[in-house]
Image: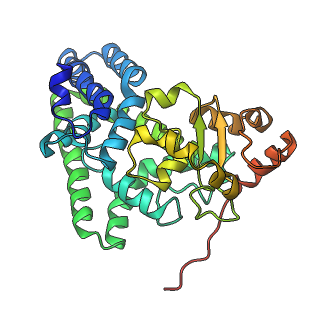
Amino acid sequence: MIEGIKTLLIDERDLPMALAFFNIIVTTLPAAAAVFYLQSHVFGLLYVVTNLITYQERFILGLHYSSHRAIFKYSALNLIPPYLLSPFFGIPSGIYYLHHCVMHHVENNVFPYDVSSTEPFQRDNFGHLIFYWLRFLIAIWFELPYYALRRQRYGLAFHCVSCIGFFMVTTSALYKMSPVGTMWVFWIYTFVTSFLLMLGNWSQHIFVSPRNPNSNYLLAYNVINVSSNQRCFNDGYHVEHHLHSRKHWSELPTSFMRSLDKYAKEGGLVFEGIDNMAVGYLTFSGQLDKLAEHYVQLGPVEWTKEEIVAELKSRLVPIHRKPKTS
């Protein structure tokens, strides 16, 4: 079977991603069908929890990288993650590409053009995170197509509205046939995923330097020597990803190592032995001194823990840009 899947791939290095998608097809989809059939809230809760623990993180990052770079030789197969599988992980079919690959990477966390920007918030304030998430949960259905219209991406705007409309109409029709199944498989899961997505984006863009928030080195950070990079296709090399969004995920660590002098010169943040979510947790809980213990010294002058904490605090303040006049 593995050899057969390899023949479908553009690059054999994407085999782990393809296998993750295959495993989801043969386990998650039948489990979702069982929730619809059994109409059991207990089984629905079990389905959501199991899917979150088993596949959520790996699927989202697989969707992420396969949206940047097609992994299959046949275009129809490349539609499976963003259209067939994504609704079972809380993302309506067909909208991830516009939100992430177009808006987030083109606008690069700049508020208000990136509607999921972290810039205007005090990023160690949990209340600001909750507002950030609720805004996404309620407004993204309107803000995302509006963004495409504003940028004159009319085809993407129409596609986005069509996908959102299809999700709403389809889930409403399914609810009439199976209220319990629709609630757990789609609606509750979408609610939970919306928070996880925003928590993830917030944590990855929690440190944004007001000195130059346009710099890729100063709007994100890298995490290295952590197991999550093996599970999630090197997602911890987030600065590298913003610098080279179409670079293959397997090449990010090498690219980072070759650029250590550039990171030191530009003031890029690197943490070792800790993942993005843990970085967010330590920041929210006021434990920047503990986070500083994971800081990787790259410059010629070694900072004290107090200097590291002071630098991290300086990158948490809201950033208010002057509106463009043209």
Residue shown at the point (64%, 45%) measured from the top left = 127
Residue 5 x, y percent position in the rendering: 18, 27
237 or 212: nearer the viewer: 237
Residue 306 x, y percent position in the rendering: 87, 43
Left or right of 96, for residue 251: right
Residue shown at the point (25%, 48%) measured from the top left = 94
110 or 180: nearer the viewer: 110
Residue 189 x, y percent position in the rendering: 36, 32
Q: How is the image coloured?
A: rainbow
Residue shown at the point (31%, 14%) measured from the top left = 43
Q: Is residue 83 visible?
A: yes
Question: Dividing the picture into quarters, in which one does residue 102 lie?
Answer: bottom left
Left or right of 227, for residue 104: left
Residue 106 x, y percent position in the rendering: 42, 63
Q: Quadrant of the N terminus?
A: top left
Residue shown at the point (36%, 42%) measured from the top left = 65
262 or 174: nearer the viewer: 262
Is residue 60 shown above or below 137? above
